[in-house]
Image (spheres, rainbow, N blue to C red):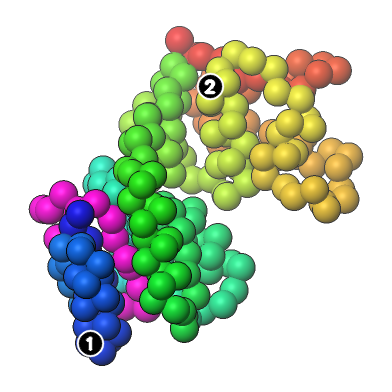
Amino acid sequence: MRILIVEDEPKMASVLRRGMEGAGLTVDVASTGGDAIWMAGSTPYDALVLDVMLPDVDGFEVCRRIRADGMWAPILMLTARDSIEDRVTGLDRGADDYLLKPFAFDELLARLRALLRRGARERPVLLEIGSLRLNPATREVSRGSEPIALSRKEYALLEAMMRRPGEVLTRGELLEVAWDHAYENRSNVIDVYMRYLRAKIDRPFGVATLLTVRGHGYRLCSDG
């Protein structure tokens, strides 16, 4: 098994390398985000151990770029930043697991072995409904050749609908996609966000693909 460690602190990188080699793994080390992106694209690694704080490109962006380039080996992110937002960002960018510094090496190795057993994830397929396209790897949306900028919640709602084309999704189902169970404003928030989506994916292109099914919810259909 070949592992890429992305860590700019020489002492930490050395400790991780020695420990992993002692566990029978083959290890390469990158000290910058730029090197990590290049190395991940040129070598078939079985997993990456990726620090968030890097001197050039941070670990979140490294993760996003290598996923966008089609590298789907498991990624274990390391960080000293203990916040839910950081963890969510890492997982949203394509990381598979998250370990807070300081950590016990045995725990890191156990998590790494679990990821190696799981293996690489399948590359997300491009979602297309007529001229509307959504790339789960890069989180990019377009209609034809025109890119469409969406907020995080708008994107989550659109992706859910594009994964079930033509089906009616209830307001309750859509609410669970982008809001947690504690969210209290359950009255018309979905209707508001569907208006936002129509204004971005339909109206500028003279199409009507996001349809209201009265008494039930919403469905997305093809414009072709």
Residue 43 horizontal side relative to residue 168, left or right: left
Secondary structure at badge 2 equals loop
Residue 119 horizontal side relative to residue 18, left or right: right
* Residue at the (22%, 87%) spot, across then down: 10
* Residue at the (28%, 56%) spot, across then down: 47
Q: Is residue 29 magenta?
A: no
User: For the view shown, which residue lies furthest in the top direction?
Assistant: 224
Amino acid marked by disc 1: Pro
Residue picked out by circle 1? 10
The image quadrant where one finds the N terminus is bottom left
- The residue nearer to you, when weighing 215 against 26, is 26
How would you rate the neighbour count of disc 2 (Cα within 10 Å): few for under 14, some for 14-19, many for 20 or more?
A: few
- The residue nearer to you, when weighing 196 against 182, is 182
State which region is magenta: 38-56
From the top left corner, tell me how far across and down residue 78 is, in percent.
41, 72
Based on the displayed image, in which of its 4 quarters is residue 118 positioned?
top left
Say whether residue 199 is visible.
Answer: no
* Residue at the (46%, 79%) spot, across then down: 103
- The residue nearer to you, when weighing 8 against 24, is 24
Based on the displayed image, in which of its 4 quarters is residue 157 positioned?
top right
From the top left corner, tell me how far across and down residue 38 is, in percent.
15, 60
Above or below, comparing residue 78 to residue 224 in the picture: below
Disc ID at residue 206: 2
Above or below, comparing residue 27 to residue 161 in the picture: below
Dot 2 or dot 1, earlier in sequence: 1
Above or below, comparing residue 159 to residue 73 in the picture: above
From the top left corner, tell me how far across and down residue 153 is, in percent.
63, 46
Say whether residue 141 is visible.
Answer: yes
**Mark nearer the viewer, 2 or 1:** 1
